[in-house]
Image (cartoon, grey):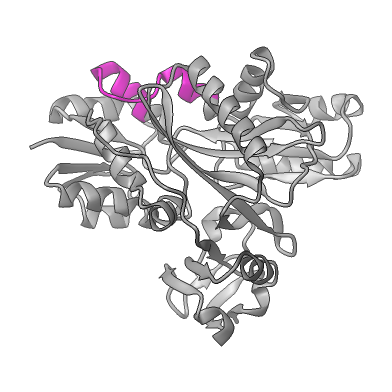
Amino acid sequence: MKKILFLGGTVQQIPAIIYAKDRGYYTILCDYQSNTPGQNYSDEYYCISTTDKVSILEIARKKNIDGIVAYISDTAAPTAAYVANKLNLPSYPCEAVAILTKKDLFRKFLRENGFNSPKAKSYKTITEAKKDLTKFQLPLMVKPIDSSGSRGISRIDSIEEIEIAFESAISKSREKTVIVEEFIEMTHDHQIGGDVFIMNGKLEFCGFLNCHRNNQVNPNVPVGKSYPLFLDEKRTEMVRNDLQRLIDLLKIKIGALNIEAIIGQNGKVYFIDVGPRNGGNLIPDFLKIITGIDCVMATVEAALGNEDLHLKYEPNEGYYSTYTLHSAEQGKLTDIIFNNEIEKNIINKFIFKEKGEEIGVFNDGTKAIGFVFLKFSSLKELKYKMNHISQYIEVQVN
């Protein structure tokens, strides 16, 4: 029986464990949270931080694992790569993961290899950052170099806003380092997002999606994805080509990448983020509905060295979206009201909070209450309802 080690057992990480169990693989889970729900689905569970490389490697050797997966986790990705590289298991190169999980290293990599990248610099203190601000052109993005789920990210339009933004960013950084970078205006309505999958160093699957935002709550946190991509084929091909060049330079041979990219005012591709993992917010589940490609399966099987994954697909003619259920207020969840006009579009609901549970303001991805998948009759209906979604779905709190 093949043994696979999973790093992280949150609700959104359970699908990978379930897939492995259904295939008859022996599943081992490591997570620092003693109440992580994933332990109820795994064969073995160890209450160990997924960032503890030494302890995770010790368990991996002791259990003689055949593969390791940090499903949807930026935090655990370096550990998974470290262990896999030590044990000669399929994975990303450690150097590639280090670059992709640290925003300062990623921006440096992009600049040095001729990719388009905003002017950016990292800082340990607000004093250092303030000294350099006149060298930047506003507006600016202020981010932790090592967070995920849009935590601690702010846009500032005046120098006076830097202190609050810097404090927010550094509070979410494990390395207590903040990156300041110039804001890049895009030429299209929605950021390009989604997941891709690499086999033998080549892009085998491109699940590009539109990223929707909610400017009323926090414009930096995605509130949904939609398909088809609102880009012409020429610009879509530009993204593919630049992504393949990035993959070649990082020497990535196998695995999923979660991407965020835009086309700037100069008509060129800018990578905002590229994560060495599957996307969160149920993106793999959404892509399976649209394309029939099972990215959960691909991730688990690739980690075990299985390469016969069949990732080719014919584009779906339908119109789909996801929506992240969230609240603009903190309080106890009273109800979630779905208007009749949106109920007919809903094909799946995933609600993680019970009525009466405490919920927070949606200022980062961890505050999601749940997700809905929707299908529309036309592109016009998709765009209208996603642009006016608050008229159709109401989260009530008290």
Residue 210 showing in the rendered view: yes
Residue at 74% x, 47% y: name it.
Answer: 188
Q: Quadrant of the N terminus?
A: top left
x then y, percent, for residue 148: 55, 42
Q: Using the image as rendered, state which of residue 50 and residue 352 is in the foreground.
A: 352
x then y, percent, for residue 249: 52, 15
124 on left or right of 37 = right
Q: Is residue 267 above or below residue 380?
A: above
Q: In which quarter of the image is residue 53?
A: top left
Range of magenta residues: 80-99
Q: Please tell me whether the stretch drawn in magenta is mainly helix, strand or loop.
A: helix
Q: Quadrant of the C terminus?
A: bottom right
83 on left or right of 272 = left
Residue at 67% x, 79% y: name it.
Answer: 391
Q: In this view, does 322 lie above or below 87?
A: below
Q: Using the image as rendered, state which of residue 138 and residue 59 is in the foreground.
A: 138
What residue occupies the far bottom of the structure in this picture? 340
Residue at 61% x, 67% y: name it.
Answer: 382
Q: Quadrant of residue 60?
A: top left
What residue occupies the far top of the structure in this picture? 112
Q: In which quarter of the image is residue 179?
A: top right
